């Protein structure tokens, strides 16, 4: 949906609580929001919950959106924050330390060439939540470790460690996928 006069009219109606306008906005940006949430979640069900939480925040905070600035950029930040909030709410279920991949080293061969974006997202979803969220915030969203530490209430060292383990686990998963393809291909 383009950010034009009609779009801003739609936002005005959404601010006033017009349900059909809110439904239109939700449907127009659902695919975009779910694509972000999927990177932070274990599965589609969790991603849908994050997106729904994000849209509640969108509708209650539309007054804070600055017309003329990218709505998608604003929505993206809200979805990421909703994912972080989801992680914090469910953090007690996520505490598991896994150092099983700490010594793994990647082949020099470029194994990403034959792996689709969907497969990479699926591999990211398989990461334990504390690793997945740090990986996404750092590698995909471009946050610094100090910002990640602040957002998640962890130390910078923990953020760096989680990123390192996430990368190692992803490398191992990608290598495993490559080896499976080699043996079947």
Image: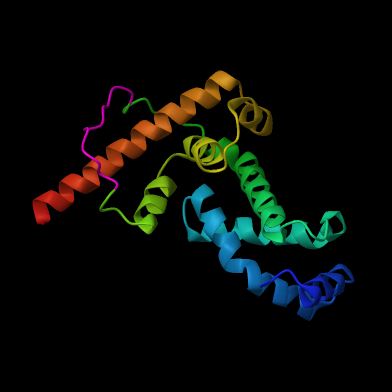
Q: Quadrant of the N terminus?
A: bottom right
Residue at position x 60%, y 42% in the image: 87
Outermost residue toward the right? 16
**Residue 7 in the image: above or below residue 170:** below
Residue at position x 17%, y 49% in the image: 180
* Coordinates of residue 138 in the picture (x, y in percent): 54, 35
Q: Quadrant of residue 36?
A: bottom right
The prevailing secondary structure element of the residues shown in magenta is: loop
* Coordinates of residue 57 in the picture (x, y in percent): 76, 56
Specify the segment rendered in magenta. 102-112
How is the structure coloured here? rainbow
* Coordinates of residue 17 in the picture (x, y in percent): 86, 72
* Coordinates of residue 146 in the picture (x, y in percent): 64, 25
Residue at position x 25%, y 41% in the image: 110
Q: Is residue 67 magenta?
A: no
Determine whether, in the image, residue 66 is placed left or right of residue 161: right
Q: Is residue 141 visible?
A: yes
Outermost residue toward the top? 157
**Residue 132 in the image: above or below residue 163:** below
Q: Is residue 109 magenta?
A: yes
Outermost residue toward the bottom? 20
Q: Quadrant of the C terminus?
A: bottom left
Q: Quadrant of residue 145?
A: top right
Q: Nearer the viewer, residue 125 or 35?
A: 35
Report the number of numbered marks: 0
Q: Is residue 48 visible?
A: no
Residue at position x 42%, y 41% in the image: 127
């Amino acid at each position: 949906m383009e950010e034009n006069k009609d779009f801003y009219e739609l936002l005005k109606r959404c601010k006033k609580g017009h349900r059909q306008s809110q439904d239109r906005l939700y449907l127009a940006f659902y695919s975009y929001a779910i694509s972000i949430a999927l990177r932070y979640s274990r599965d589609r069900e969790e991603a849908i919950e994050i997106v729904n939480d994000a849209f509640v925040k969108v509708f209650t905070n539309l007054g804070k959106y600055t017309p003329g600035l990218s709505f998608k950029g604003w929505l993206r930040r809200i979805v990421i924050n909703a994912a972080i909030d989801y992680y914090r709410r469910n953090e007690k279920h996520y505490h598991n330390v896994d150092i099983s991949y700490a010594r793994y080293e990647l082949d020099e061969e470029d194994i990403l060439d034959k792996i689709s974006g969907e497969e990479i997202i699926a591999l990211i979803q398989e990461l334990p939540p504390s690793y997945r969220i740090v990986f996404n915030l750092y590698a995909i969203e471009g946050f610094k470790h100090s910002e990640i530490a602040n957002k998640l209430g962890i130390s910078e060292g923990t953020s760096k460690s989680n990123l390192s383990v996430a990368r190692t686990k992803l490398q191992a998963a990608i290598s495993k996928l490559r080896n499976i393809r080699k043996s079947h291909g």
